[in-house]
Amino acid sequence: MVALDFQTNRPTPVPPLNPDPEDAQGEKQRRNLAMWNKARLKHRRETSMLLRERMSIPPTPEEMRGVHELHRIAAQAWEEGNSRQVELVNSRQVELVRTHTHSVCQTIFPEGRNVHGALFGGYIMHEGFDIAHFAAKYFMGGDPIAIGLDEAVFVQPVAVGDMLKFTARVVHVACRVVRVNVVVEVLHPDAFGPGRVADALNTNFDGRVVGKRSNRMMFLFLHSKKGETTDGCLPQVVPDSYKEILMHVDALRRQKEEGPTEEFISHHYGI
């Protein structure tokens, strides 16, 4: 966010935030939280699985064993004659990630631009949340409660006239907590219409790389009621492609590191 001078409409400094000398304990807690968050982000960069990153680390053997177990359970479900949802011996159900992948496309119009002429970032967040909420509700079969945002990464600006594709995937389930990954891609203008060029994707246009992702977000939703399985949890989701596996493992890491746990949910939400 930028502060603008109302007369010149140019960026202007804002008054500094001076800590309250009587709030020493609070200041210490905020400083410790900032240090923890800095270390967490550093660790996340060092273990990033993003294929576009210069340093991309594959999932660990333990994480791949977990994915293997999900596929083993899914294979049992297929053999029992129901490929979508089957009550298994361990009282867990399985769903495929691709079954809960949803997309929506739109063109960006001038009313969505900011003072710099590009698309206002809040618009991307709003549209991303809407499709994430749809994916969560479609998966849960009830009204999801939005409880968090793991990340919101803006890779490059979006211009007026761009054609966007929002793709939401339910990538991880921790009992009643569902994580939905949303990827926003900009379509290259040469990739559509009667004169489309097959190799137009992933090339430069107006100084921007288009045909690739522009933004990515990870939303957290909570099911307000216990699931219909014996243990009260929602079905597990099974990643199929390698891209889905990376999204699933990334969400799994976030759940282990940051939660929320069932105890936290019961204490803070009372459900």
Image: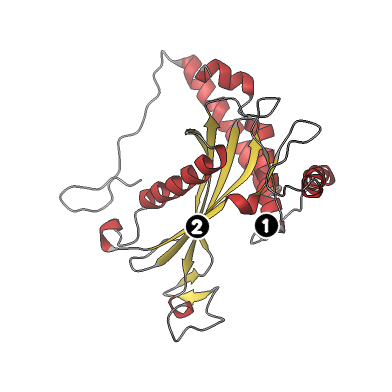
Badge 2: residue crowd in 10 Å (few <14, some 14–19, many ≥20): some
Seen as rendered, the residue at the extreme top is 22
Q: Check disc 1 and give the amino acid type.
A: Lys
Label 1 vs label 2: CA separation?
16 Å
Q: How packed is label 1: few (under 14 Cα within 10 Å), some, or many (20 or more)?
A: few
Counting from the top left corner in percent of width and height, residue 76 is at: 82, 45
Frontmost residue, 157 versus 19: 157
Question: How many numbered marks appear?
Answer: 2
1 vs 2, front mark: 2
Q: Looking at this view, is 101 or 27 the one in front?
A: 101
Q: Is residue 150 visible?
A: no
* Three-letter residue code for mark 2: Ser
Q: Is residue 225 above or below residue 137?
A: above
Residue at the spot of label 2: 103
Residue toward you, 44 or 132: 132
Task: Quadrant for the N terminus, please.
Answer: top left
* Residue that lies at the very extreme toward the bottom in this rendered image: 195
Say whether disc 1 or disc 2 marks the residue closer to the N-terminus: 2
Q: Quadrant of residue 177?
A: top right
From the viewer's perspective, is residue 191 above or below residue 124?
below
Q: What residue is drawn where x is 57% and y is 18%? A: 266
User: Which residue sits furthest left?
Assistant: 7
On the image, the x and y values in percent for residue 202 come to 55, 73
Residue closest to the eye, 145 or 258:
145
Identify the image quadrant of residue 258.
top right
**Left or right side of 16 for 193:** right
The location of residue 21, given as percent across then percent down, is 41, 16
Describe residue 237's horizontal placement relative to residue 77 as left or right: left
Q: Which mark is residue 243?
A: 1
Determine whether 93 is above or below 54 in the image: above
